Image (tube, rainbow, N blue to C red):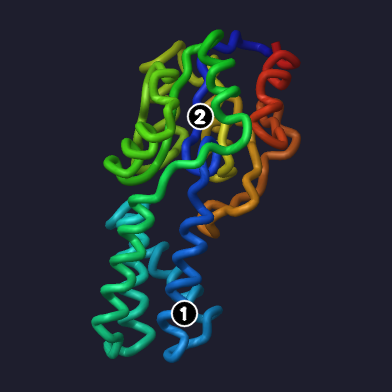
Amino acid sequence: MSARLTTVGFDADDTLWHNEQFYRITQDRFCDLLREFTESDHLMQRLLEAERRNIGHYGFGIKGFVLSMIETAIEVTEERVPAGVIRELIAAGQDMLQHPIELLPFAREAVEAMAGRYRVLLITKGDLLDQERKLAQSGLGELFDGVEIVSAKTPAVYRDIFSRHSQGPEHAMMVGNSMKSDVVPVIEAGGWGVYVPHGLVWALEHQDPPQGHARYREIADLGGLTALIADLT
């Protein structure tokens, strides 16, 4: 390792705890509610288009997702969507906001191991209140030296975070399940990017891995993080 590692950042959703599966469940509910108006594949395509348009307005998270579903329902039904369907979509979003947190395998062990050796940060996108709720329910909050809830994960954002919390990105590592948000921009900022596949990935988070890059690594799950860092150092 060319620069001494001092800081390890963790993504939250689908890295430390389950998240995407609840979106998939709600999408299935959405398709069922609109089945008399359009095919599921077409509906999902229109929803993805709405989410892509609306990220700049609503940001990432459940609230923006619900608003995109409502907008899509209005569009595909040509403004004939029943009020009961809108009510059901709002209820689905409220269910998501109240769902208990379930940690992923080795999440606690990995954070605890890093907390004993490095400065540990939680760096996540999404709605502020929802992410704070998840962190509080996770039981991991006391292990983090800093928590950053951001609207986007870009090289500039990572450079700022790691410069404020440590000696800069060249001394930092980010661990997460999104190639687009957790890995590639950190590497572009000069840090280490560790990819932990989750299986369920939002379509807007897909990106090709930086294969061959000296600061890119992949582990099957968080149980392999300690050994990975030991090999690097």
Dot 1 corresponds to which residue?
A: 32
**Image point (71%, 16%), residue name:** 232
Label 2, residues with CA under 10 Å away: few <14, some 14-19, many ≥20: many
Q: Is residue 20 above or below residue 12?
A: below
Q: Quadrant of residue 53?
A: bottom left
The C terminus is located in which quarter?
top right
**Image point (33%, 70%), residue name:** 89
Q: Is residue 230 above or below residue 60?
A: above
Looking at the image, tell me whether mark 2 or mark 1 is earlier in sequence order.
Answer: 2
**Image point (75%, 16%), residue name:** 231
Which of 225 and 161 lies nearest the eye of the viewer? 225
Question: Left or right: where does residue 205 sit relative to residue 99?
Answer: right
What is the x, y in percent for residue 188? 55, 32
Q: Quadrant of residue 51?
A: bottom left
Which of 140 and 56 lies nearest the eye of the viewer? 140
Tag 2 near tag 1, CB within 8 Å: no
Q: Is residue 71 above or below residue 166?
A: below
Which of 157 and 124 lies nearest the eye of the viewer? 124
The label number, if any, that marks residue 10 in the structure image: 2
The label number, if any, that marks residue 22 in the structure image: none
Question: Left or right: where does residue 14 sit relative to residue 128?
Answer: right
User: Which three-letter amino acid code belongs to the residue tagged 1?
Assistant: Asp
